[in-house]
């Protein structure tokens, strides 16, 4: 398991996400605003961190929340050491500053700002009723002349 945690924390974006969740629970909206990457990219990073046990998640309505997981020792010590070291880097210090500003925003307002990018968007609308084609009524097959 230590190797899995080290692999999960071997990416700067994943370190940024994990550091942001240290000591608090964050919505995906807040994480998206911090790292400024595509929702699908952030989702993949969160999946790797959760699979390794670095992050834990819970769903509340349409929001998905993440927090640091509780891996057993010595894995927890590895996570703490990696996050402590990353927190001292320029990127880590800047993320802490930016996150303070993000946490001041209303979660619903932040979600509305990010909705264009796919964050916490409501379920897609069902298809509207309209004309439907019958099966096989598409292009006719071309018959070769003999």
Image (cartoon, rainbow, N blue to C red):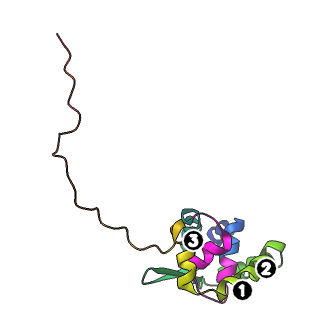
The numbered mark at residue 46 is 3
> Are the two marked residues, 3 and 2, in contact with CB atoms closer than 8 angstroms?
no
- Dot 1: element: helix
Q: Is 1 left, or right, of 81 in this rendering?
A: left
Instruction: Establish if 119 lies above or below 107.
Output: above
* Residue 37 higher or lower than 28, as above or below: above
Q: Position of residue 119 (x, y in %)?
A: 52, 72
- Residue denoted by label 2: 87
Separation of residues labelled 1 and 3 (CA atoms): 21 Å
CB atoms of marks 2 and 1 within 8 Å = no
Q: Which of marks 3 and 2 is nearer the N terminus?
A: 3
- Between residues 47 and 75, which one lies in front from this camera angle? 47
Up the image or down, 1 lies above or below 77; here it is above
Could you tell me how far apart the alpha carbons at marks 2 and 1 are, in whole angstroms? 14 Å
Q: Give the range drawn in magenta.
A: 18-38
Residue placed most toward the observer, 130 or 36: 130
| Category of crowding for the residue at label 1, using alpha-carbon neighbours closer than 10 angstroms: few (below 14), some (14–19), many (at least 20) | few
Any magenta on residue 33?
yes
Q: How crowded is mark 3: few (under 14 residues within 10 Å), some or many (20 or more)?
A: many
* Residue under the image location 65 percent in, 72 percent down: 2
49 in the magenta segment: no
Q: In which quarter of the image is residue 135?
A: top left
Residue 92 visible somewhere in the drawing: yes
Residue under the point 77% across and 82% down: 97
Quadrant in the picture for the C terminus? top left
User: What's the mark number on residue 100?
Assistant: 1
Looking at the image, the residue that sits furthest to the top is 146
Left or right: where does residue 97 sit relative to residue 140?
right
x, y (%) of residue 58? 48, 83
Nearer the observer: mark 1 or 3; the answer is: 1
Q: How far apart are marks 3 and 2 (CA)?
A: 19 Å
């Amino acid at each position: 398991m230590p190797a899995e945690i080290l692999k999960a924390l071997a990416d700067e974006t994943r370190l940024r996400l994990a550091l942001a969740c240290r000591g608090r629970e964050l919505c995906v909206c807040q994480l998206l605003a911090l790292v400024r990457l595509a929702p699908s990219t952030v989702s993949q990073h969160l999946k790797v961190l959760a699979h390794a046990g670095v992050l834990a998640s819970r769903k509340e309505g349409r929001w998905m929340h993440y927090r640091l997981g509780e891996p057993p020792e010595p894995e927890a010590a590895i996570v703490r050491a990696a996050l402590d070291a990353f927190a001292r880097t320029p990127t880590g210090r800047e993320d802490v500053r930016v996150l303070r500003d993000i946490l001041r925003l209303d979660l619903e307002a932040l979600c509305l700002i990010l909705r264009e990018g796919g964050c916490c968007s409501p379920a897609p609308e069902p298809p509207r009723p309209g004309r439907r084609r019958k099966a096989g009524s598409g292009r006719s097959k071309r018959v070769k002349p003999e």
